[in-house]
Amino acid sequence: MITRPKVARLGESEKVSFGPDAFYQALLGDGDTPIFLGIQTSEPGYKTEVHVHPYVETLFVLDGEAEVWLVGKENEAARLAVGDCVAMPPDQAHGFRVIGDKTLRTLGIHASPERIANFVDGSETGAHGYAQHWSETE
């Protein structure tokens, strides 16, 4: 638990690659705050692997446009633009993708002190709840 303000600086945050088209920078979430917070930067054409979190995940669009959906309800996908946010329900498989030709930047707020992602395809997650779905040569 923190006892004084905790400052996180995006410029000092490690970039964790999500393949050739996206990376994630964690800002808070080393166990001493009740949330995990970070910024994902995704290039046009990027689409997440379908995954589940055991808690609410909120995405806020900083730049670009996205489409988000729940598995089985793809026909109800929501389109998000700058300033929009969505809260994804816990324990429900979901994904998002970049819409258009602009870079998408999202602020992800995980209602957990650590990021936990369980991938529907059975992929193992590494440190910080990230999974690798690409080859090292990409």
Image: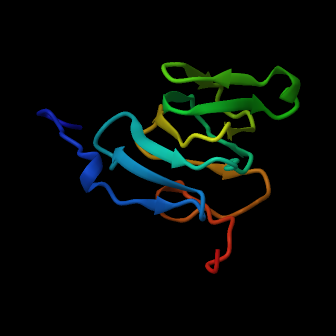
From what the image shows, is residue 10 above or below residue 21? above
For image coordinates 18% across by 40% down, the residue present is: 7
- Total labels: the figure holds 0
Q: Quadrant of residue 125?
A: bottom right
Spot occupied by residue 99 in the image (x, y as percentages of width and height):
68, 36
Residue 85 horizontal/vertical position (percent): 54, 21
Q: Is residue 32 left or right of residue 99?
A: left
- Above or below, 127 against 76 in this view is below
The residue sitting at 64% across, 80% down in the picture is 137
Q: Nearer the viewer, residue 109 or 64?
A: 64
Q: x, y (%) of residue 34?
A: 36, 33
| Frontmost residue, 137 versus 38 | 137
Which residue is the extreme one toward the left?
4
Of 85 and 35, nearer the camera is 85
Q: Residue at x 79, y 57 (%)?
A: 121
Quadrant of the frame with the C terminus: bottom right
Residue 13 against residue 87 in the figure, above or below: below
Is 117 placed left or right of 3 in the picture?
Answer: right
Q: Please state which of residues 68 and 55 is positioned toward the viewer in this rendering.
A: 68
Residue at the extreme bottom: 137
Apparent side of residue 86 relative to residue 113 in the rendered image (left or right): right
Image quadrant assignment for residue 103: top right
Where's residue 69, x and y in %? 75, 30
What residue is at 70 percent from the left and 47 percent from the top?
Answer: 47
Work out which quarter of the rendered image holds the N terminus and state it. top left
Colouring used for the render: rainbow
Q: From what the image shows, is residue 107 above or below residue 122?
A: above
